[in-house]
Amino acid sequence: MERFNRLSLCGKIIIFNFKRASATNDCDRSELIFSSLGFEREDNTFLKAADGAAIISRKRSAHVDIVKCKCAINVQKRVTTACILVTKKSEKGESFQYSLLTLSSSNRLEPCIEFKLPYQLMRETVYILHGPTVLWSHTGNVFYASLQAGEVRQIPIQVSHSVIGELPLHKEHVFVLGLHNLSDQCTPSTSQTLGYFVESGQVFDGTMILPHPYICVTRCILVLSAEKVDDVLKSAVIAATSNQQLVYFANGIVKDVCQLPFEQPENIQVVNTGRNGRLFVISFHEGHVCAVWKETFQIASHWSSVNSVHVDDFLGCGTDQMLLFFKDQGITDQPLDTFLLTDLCGISYSHGQDSEASKTPPPSPENDLLTLRALESRLQSGLTVLQELQREVRVKDRVLQQSVRALSDVVSESQTILTQPEQEGLIALWDCDDESKDEALDDKTQDMPAVSSKPQIDKLWHRITEERMVVGVILTTDSSVPVASVSLSILTETGQSSTPAVIQTQSQVFWLPAPCSSSSSSSSSAYMFSEPAAKRSKQHNAGRPNDLNTCRLAVTAVTRLTPLLNSGCVKCHVMLHYVQRQDAFALVSNPTPVVLHCGQFALDVHSDFQTRLLKKPRSQNRRG
């Protein structure tokens, strides 16, 4: 890409150039002049906001040139400032004097760093980074100069194929990655990936940023995020390679790849378009530029014949836009005459060369409105889900606290007492015997006849709580013929198929105490929560034996309703599985399992489950 001495800062374009003017003492002096220009929407052009100059040399024979200009953070002033690196060649050409100048807020060029080298720096190998710090590579070594160093220093580790970048960490920003060769070959077995922090001099594992195979092919890099967790570096990195690929790395692992349309990438920038997402803008050597969406990692658009590309908020609207300057077809006195200002999301200003505009046309206002509504709906839905999750967390915390308190009461043999609000928040799983018959109608119970020589089914019930269904059976067994391995299974039968299907359940068995009127059950009541009277219903007592040789069990099964969402009315058969033997503690080699059909019930999934899911979001949307 043809080089122009331009950079963007605070929504302005700053142009640097050298000018030779004749002085009164018959000597030539070299001046570095600059102009700051802002974009005017009404005129669709750039207007000068400020300008200035600084004398670099007063000697006629001095050869002065601009090496590179870039914005960097000044750690002393804690601001981002425009930096420009200039060089003066000695009369004999034996040495080169380098000066890094910064543009102050008062539009004055101030010297920042000065150093002398016996060789000339190539702008492709020079980096201006945080500090400001000037880094460059020469004859396989990496050197740097900064305000903190005060001199030219060499990286103490010997690396090849160096990759230079910045990390957004608190104390360590500028890093150098490279292969520390153990032999002449560049292979994983003969070299290791090392990283070096310039500020602290610390060496770290470079594979946490780039894996070993990508060090040799990476042309430019951009670190999106980085942090240290337990002294381990975590990072998200974008790298453009010589294989025409844009690669996304997370902690040194490849996560996504985008094939680039051009070769020789040189720079990566990020365009934050606000609610529309982010773009990666990649500049290439021969004047090509392409933009890639961060969210989809797909190419959004590309351009050719570009002199320079800049990213900033040129319109002052709070989001970024990219500004592309195209080749001027021989026009040299108007360096900002041919440009395109766009964010590929509706903002588009161009001048001088419409044919070089984006290959992707800007969306219409109707599309913008639809996109805005869709994003607002997504935000509303996300807030609803977040509120539901927060509510579930509060409920779980309350249940855990009550469980710990109940466990403490059990250990201390004291009775758990629940307040009325706590009781109202409970859902009764089975009912007590001393309630009225009218309340029993609300519990969807179904009385089952007793089966001789088998456990007697007293009650079959089911309830729906959130996305789960709980099925329970209360049964009476003869203590002289104990049962073991008790569980429930559910067979579903829809109208579309005559073959029942077994759904996955999780069973639990509870030993019930004597009837509620018995005073002898007070000791065991400490193991059970009392339930609110409004949610209890009468159990079916028909045909139940009333002697001291019987014991009562409650068996529950919990299953998810998700597999039944596509069904309408489902008929559920409840099967009881158990092993019956004369002595439950006797060693029986092959106990015979018994299956008992407890009954069935019909479940309307659409009315009982899906309607319940739709009620809360709608009501919250009305309140919002």
Image (tube, grey):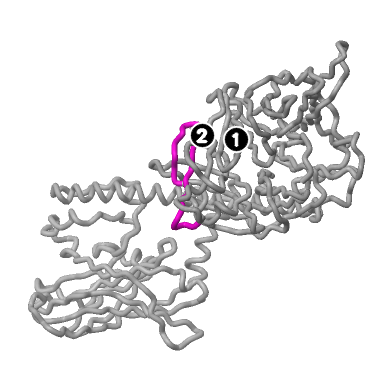
Q: Position of residue 283 (x, y in %)?
A: 72, 48
Q: Is residue 445 left or right of residue 481?
A: right
Q: Position of residue 261 (x, y in %)?
A: 72, 58
**Membership of 260 in magenta stretch:** no
Q: Position of residue 400 (x, y in %)?
A: 30, 49
Identify the amino acid type marked 2.
Val
**Membership of 204 in magenta stretch:** yes
Identify the amino acid type marked 1.
Leu
Q: Nearer the viewer, residue 275 or 491?
A: 275
Within 10 Å of the Cα at label 1, are there few (<14), some (14-19), or many (20+) other Cα atoms? Answer: many
**Please, what secondary structure does the residue beneath circle 1 have?**
strand
Q: Is residue 380 left or right of residue 519?
A: right
Q: Nearer the viewer, residue 226 or 371?
A: 226
Q: Which mark is residue 198?
A: 2
Q: Look at the picture and state if 503 lies above or below 234.
A: below
Q: Look at the picture and state if 459 lies above or below 622.
A: below
User: Label 1: which residue?
Assistant: 135
Q: Quadrant of residue 273?
A: top right
Q: Quadrant of residue 189?
A: bottom left
Residue farthest front in this picture:
92
Please report the residue visible at 44 percent of the width from the left and 74 percent of the height from the top. Answer: 603
Please report the residue visible at 65 percent of the width from the left and 49 percent of the height from the top. Answer: 376
Residue farthest bottom in this picture:
498
Region of the chain picked out in magenta, as a range: 187-205
Within 10 Å of the Cα at label 2, are there few (<14), some (14-19), or many (20+) other Cα atoms? Answer: many
Please report the residue visible at 52 percent of the width from the left and 55 percent of the height from the top. Answer: 616
Q: Look at the picture and state if 318 lies above or below 527.
A: above
